[in-house]
Amino acid sequence: MADERGKLLLVAPAVMVTQRFRWLKQIVAGGRIGRPTLVTAQLAGMGPAGWRTYTGDPAVFYGPGVGPLIDTGVYLLHAITGLLGPARRVQALTGIAIPEREVAIERLAGQRIAVTTPDHILLQLDFGGATFAQILSSFAVPRSKAPVLELHGTEGSVSIGIEHWYDADGPVDLFVRDGGPLGVEGWLDEVAPPVPGPSSNVIASGLPHFAACLDGTEQPILTAAHATHVLEIMLKAGEAADAGRTLELETTF
């Protein structure tokens, strides 16, 4: 409808317009880590019921139509497909690991939430050419030290820790393999994008991009086609888990 009416439509999340992920896309496209072969990613915690300073209603996140994949896993999927392109197939395991939650928010002390949607989701994506992604999206992990996202190629690896995930200009750890006899290689820790972006927060980064598209200084990155592909992945992950098999994806961008 937006195309038919000549209107601009952009879609959140804004991961791919952050300065960090624009920079990473150039690194991948330029072959600095070789051909991408694997992404491992996770956003795993206890969900809003365990977020003591949360000001909204935590119960909705544990009910039908929401869950961790819709809430936070969507950021990972936008990042992974933004870097690697459209996925071809999806498979998943899902379940309710903790059927009832006690709310840790002080103003809701004593409230309990019945969990009626999967709070534990492990899904895999096939991009073709033996390039895969594995994503953990969970409200049933008390705490983890695992990186939020790691991208591996034939010649190097990129790692992003949770402490820098929500920083739009945040650094990455970078490893570039040395195929020569001297083996001069190692991790470069906290390498930051060379130029900071207009917003330092991942969630707010879409706003200056939208304005730049309106005034013609940038081309749209956060397209509805990309978001529709991510939505199909999330919905078909549940279908794949229920069916116990891998499902083909139909959308692209």
Image (cartoon, rainbow, N blue to C red):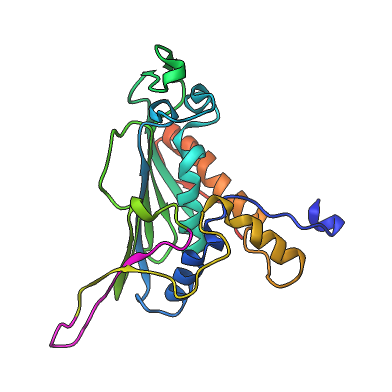
Q: Residue at x 58, y 64 (%)?
A: 198
Residue 98 versus residue 227 in the image, above or below: above
Q: Residue 12 at what x, y percent from top left?
A: 60, 50
Q: Is residue 250 visible?
A: no
Residue 47 versus residue 190 in the image, above or below: above
Tell whether 180 sits left or right of 172: left
- Seen from the viewer's position, the closer of residues 170 and 14 is 170
Main SS, magenta residues: loop
Residue 240 versus residue 95 in the image, above or below: below
- Seen from the viewer's position, the closer of residues 141 and 171 is 171
What is the count of numbered marks? Answer: 0
Q: Residue 193 at what x, y percent from top left?
A: 44, 71
- The quarter holding residue 27 reads bottom left
Q: Residue 249 at what x, y percent from top left?
A: 54, 50
Q: Residue at x 43, y 13 (%)?
A: 111
- Seen from the viewer's position, the closer of residues 157 and 241 is 157
Q: Is residue 171 visible?
A: yes
Tell whether 135 sits left or right of 168: left
Q: Quadrant of the C terminus?
A: bottom right
Magenta stretch, residue numbers: 168-184
Q: Residue at x 20, y 78 (%)?
A: 185
- Give yes or no for residue 63 being in the magenta stretch: no
- Give yes or no for residue 181 being in the magenta stretch: yes
